[in-house]
Amino acid sequence: MRYSAAEIRNALNNNELCVYYQPMCVTMTGQLKSAEALVRWIRPDGTIIPPDSFIPEAEGSDLIMDIDWYVTEQVCRTLEKQNMMPQYPISVNFSRKHIHEKNFAERLASMMDKYDLPHPLLEIEITESAMVDEEALLLDWIISIRKAGFTVAIDDFGSGLSSLQFIKDIPADVLKIDKSLLSHNCEDEKEKIVLESIFTFAHRLHMKTVAEGVETKEQLAFLRSCDCNKIQGYLFAKPMPEKEYLELCQTYRGTDEFNDILEVQSTSSSLNLLIEAVLYRYPLIIFTNLTRNTYYAMAHQDFTSTNCPSTGVFDELIEHGVNSMHPEDRELFEATFNRENLIKEYKSGTKMIRLTTRQLGDDGIYRKVETVDCFVSSDYSTDIIAITLCENLAD
């Protein structure tokens, strides 16, 4: 059954809309970390009307904005009641209509300040569908929110036409993975690959991750292997009224035992750990496609006096390297690592090339650097691939 805007407005004015809270827990320990505020319509006779029976109608007008602000006010009151107990951040969903609301961040800050609450205790959630249009306006809106001290989460990622372009450009703090991506209980190989990829790029973009709709231990084990930060779902807790949530904040302790991450490690996560370890030994790693004259570099720390771009044309990278070498080493370095010579060495069956040179440091001193090129092959391409490992040597 769907309700009219007039009926919903009447329910709002009569305080029939209530806020429920669904906990979000640390994936590895099950400890309560935060919660999401969810609106419920409770009729005078006790009947609970689910959001999908009235929220779509409210979203058709500015009524949804009034509901969002009403929920935010209730959340502030809940947070205020936690002053004498553990205080956990709460996230609130906001309609895309708020993007056009003048002084939104100021109003949000004013409401939190009225209750003397730290701004980081409130997280603003906006669904990925809100990013389809008006990207520039959305970007300014999010920047203003974050400048006011609030965190921003992209909700329901994967539920629609997810765009990596938006994720790259929008400065959000949290990425919430929609439950639809867990539909095969994390046992389908393709589902695993997609999820692993999402968590990998989110972490590399320095975004926290939350998996929604977690209901089974199989899902939990896999999400742990992907280094998912938090989970939200029936496996840990259903949405609950304020009284029950406040009691939970005082007494909740995760009961699910802690599993060593290495016992449930996925291939993707293991590779990430391996790369991190290799970067400690070789602070500069370069992946090169010699066939296409391109490269991609990963650096653990500043390695040269003038940092090279992280990606670009390989011939230009070698020129950059030559210019940073000691004059006596430049000719040998260029002759060894120019693309023509590397392709010739690869075709002759060479597996690895090593060379020690002197490279200029930030302090103007030349230090020994060992450069190792390893040729590798791929089942997916006939291109000539080289991995370069660069290590600073002790004097």
Image (cartoon, helix red, strand yellow):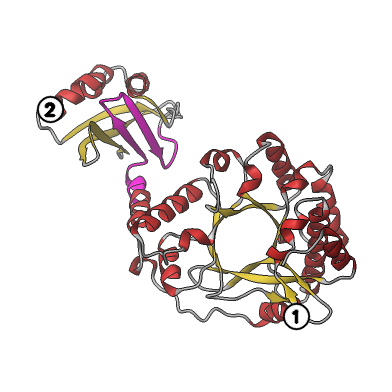
Residue type pointed to by label 1: Lys
- Residue 347 — which label? 2
Query: SS class of the residue under badge 2?
Result: helix
Q: Residue 57 is drawn in which quadrant?
A: bottom right
Q: Position of residue 59 (x, y in %)?
A: 75, 53
Q: Hey, what amino acid is under mark 2?
A: Lys
Query: Which disc, if any, is residue 243?
Result: 1
Q: Residue at x 51, y 68 (%)?
A: 214
Q: Residue at x 50, y 67 (%)?
A: 27
Residue 332 visible in the picture: no
Along the polypeptide, which appears first: circle 1 or circle 2?
1
Foreground of the two, 29 or 187? 187
User: Looking at the figure, which quarter contains the C terminus?
Assistant: top left
**Residue 10, how many percent across, how many down?**
88, 65
Q: Position of residue 38 (x, y in %)?
A: 70, 66
Which residue is nearer to you in this view: 364 or 379?
Answer: 379
Give the residues drawn in magenta, as a range. 277-303
Q: Which quadrant of the figure has residue 131? A: top right
